[in-house]
Image: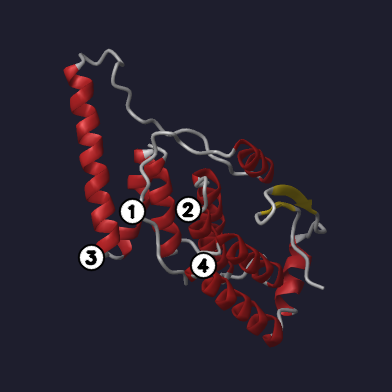
Amino acid sequence: HYSVSKEPSKDYRSGREKSVSYSSKSQESRERSSKEYTPYMAARARELKEEGNRRFQSKDYAGAMEEYDLALKLTPVDHPERAVFHSNRAACLMHMNPIQYDLAIHECDLALRAHPGFTRALLRRSRAFEALGKLDFALRDVEELLRGDPNHPDALDIAKRIRASIVQQEENKAENGGDGKEERHHVRGRPSTPAAVENSIKQGTKSRNAPQLIADRSND
C-alpha cells in the first residue's frame, strides 16, 4: 500500500474533524514509492479525479473533496499531478459554507509545491487572499502568473481590481492624514503546517468583510 506523511483530515460530510495517520517517509522511501506508482494506480487516481469533478459540478463539494483526497493517497508525494488534486480541493473549500479561505490558501500552497507556477492554484490563491484583504499577496500571485502568460484574462481582471483597491486604500489613508483611521490590509500569517490547518478548521476561519468572489465553476 502507498503511504504519505502524517496529515490531518476532516470529515466534511459530518462536520467532524478526524486525524488520519500515515507513516513518515524518508527521501529514499519517497523515491522508491515513485517507482511503485503503477499505471493502474495512475488510472485509478484519474478516475477519482473525474468523479470528484462530477460531484463538484453537482455542487456536492464535500463529496468532491473526498474523491480528490483519495486520489492524493494514491499519488506519490513528489508527483506533479498532486497539484491538480490540491488545487481542486481549494476550489471546493471556496464554495463551501462557510467559505474556508485560509484552508483554500493552504491547499494552493501544496499545489504550488508540487507544481510551481500552476495556473489554477495561483488564481485560486489570489482570489482567496483578496477575499481576506491580503491584497499584497493577492497581487503577487497574479503578477507571477502574468509573467508567464501576459494575456491571461482572469489574471488581468484580478490584477486590475486589486490595484484599484490598493490605490483607493492609499487615497483613504491620505484623506485621514495617515493617522491609521483607514487601515491598509496588511499581509497576515496563514496556515502552513498541518496543526495550523486543523486549528483553522476548528475556528471556521472566514473574514466577515470578505467579498464573496466568484470562484471557478469547473475543475481540472
**How far across and down, in percent of the image, does residue 161 sit?**
24, 47
Quarter-of-image position of residue 73: bottom right
User: Could you tell me how far apart the alpha carbons at marks 3 and 1 are, in whole angstroms?
Assistant: 11 Å
Nearest to viewer (mark 1 / mark 4): 4
**How far across and down, in percent of the image, does residue 181 sit?**
29, 16
Q: Secondary structure at mark 3?
A: loop
Q: Secondary structure at mark 2?
A: loop
Q: Which badge, 2 or 4, is on the more N-terminal residue? A: 4
Let me know if residue 164 appears in the view. Answer: yes
User: Could you tell me how far apart the alpha carbons at marks 2 and 1 are, in whole angstroms?
Assistant: 18 Å
Q: Residue at x 39, y 57 (%)?
A: 215
Residue behind mark 2? 94
Q: How is the image coloured?
A: secondary structure
User: Could you tell me how far apart the alpha carbons at marks 2 and 4 are, in whole angstroms?
Assistant: 12 Å
Residue behind mark 3? 151
Evaluate if marks 3 and 1 touch, with contact meaning CB atoms under 8 Å apart: no
Q: Which mark is residue 80?
A: none
Q: Nearer the viewer, residue 103 or 194?
A: 103
User: Could you tell me how far apart the alpha carbons at marks 3 and 4 are, in whole angstroms?
Assistant: 28 Å
Nearest to viewer (mark 3 / mark 4): 4
Residue behind mark 1? 142
